[in-house]
Image (cartoon, helix red, strand yellow):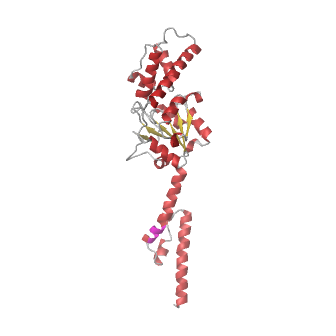
Amino acid sequence: MPKTSAYTASIFAACSVGTVLLCANFAGRQDQMVASPVMARRGVSNPMLRAMQRPINARRASMMRMQAAPEALLFDCDGVLVDTEKDGHRVAFNRAFKEKGLDLEWGVERYGKLLEVGGGKERMTAHFNEMGWPAGWPEDADGRAAKVKEIHLLKTDIFSEMIKKGELALRPGVQRLVDEAVQKGIQVACCSTSNEKSVAAVIDLMPDELSSKFSIFAGDMVDKKKPDPAVYLLASEKLGIAPSKCAVIEDSHIGNKAGKSAGMTVVVTKSGYTGGEDFTGADQIVDELGDAGNMVTIDSIAGLMP
């Protein structure tokens, strides 16, 4: 064959290889490339094909992860950010009862039972409905609700002071995961049945560059408390992000139900009171978010998203 013809044939072969690769990439079937025998005849080996495919596959995998990543990360507060219930809220309630002259102290077991009720005021109401209302309190529902609110406000102040004094700390992995979310431009929020002031005090345990990024949906912003999904649906609406693009971090079965009922992905990080609860439907269940080893990350959450 003349040199010119040989050169032309080699150029044609190279262009054909490139064209076949491009078409295979477009069709998304690199792993089933029917043109492999043709390439083999022209001197393109299977190892070479795999090497040429790797950058394309890596880019595709990266794009899939980006598409699946949550657009909002919604944290519960108590038991998730800080394991507050046993040594935080329970203690604050008991101090408030004492200051108000009530002969009442919630033990660890009793408070654990009351946690089945969402919301501090609701928790007190449930206790008094079951055990009897304090002597001398109003008999009408409005009057009783006002007394409950009064104690709850005092309890919130006591709890906030406990946080400021450093009596409670963030759980492992919380600050790391929040920082990762912020760095990746993911919105962060706290959705809690607790009073907004208490939630803000907990969030302020983080550095300013992280705490300032939080939106708070808490307390009486919604009429119905968890397990009703109202607080998570409110967050979705206000943040302008579809529920399917939101990931929830919860610690309780009522929180898990609220997140799943809202149509969101839920990761459960078990807390001191909730380890034995039924988390049916949760997308992942862990002991903690973690700062080392098998950590919960934005990428791992992305792998759970629909």
Which residue sits furthest bottom? 2
Residue 88 lies, with reference to residue 70, above or below; the image says above
Foreground: 81 or 61?
Answer: 81
Q: Residue at x 52, y 74 (%)?
A: 17
Q: Residue at x 44, y 28 (%)?
A: 162
Foreground: 157 or 123?
Answer: 157
Q: Residue at x 46, y 16 (%)?
A: 99
Which residue sits furthest left? 293
Residue 134 lies, with reference to residue 124, above or below; the image says above
Q: Residue at x 47, y 12 (%)?
A: 132
Foreground: 118 or 197?
Answer: 197
Residue 298 image offset from top left, x and y in percent: 48, 47
**Residue 91 is inside the magenta segment:** no
Residue 295 image offset from top left, x and y in percent: 41, 46
How many labels were placed on the picture?
A: 0
Which residue sits furthest top? 136
Q: Main secondary structure of the magenta part?
A: helix
Foreground: 68 or 202?
Answer: 202
Report the side of 233 relative to 297 (left or right). right
Res. 113 in view: no
Image: magenta residue range: 48-52
Give residue 171's quadrant in the image: top left
Residue 90 image offset from top left, x and y in percent: 43, 24
Res. 146 in view: yes
**Residue 50 is inside the magenta segment:** yes
Give residue 79's quadrant in the image: top left
Residue 216 image offset from top left, x and y in percent: 56, 35
Residue 84 lies, with reference to residue 293, above or below; the image says above
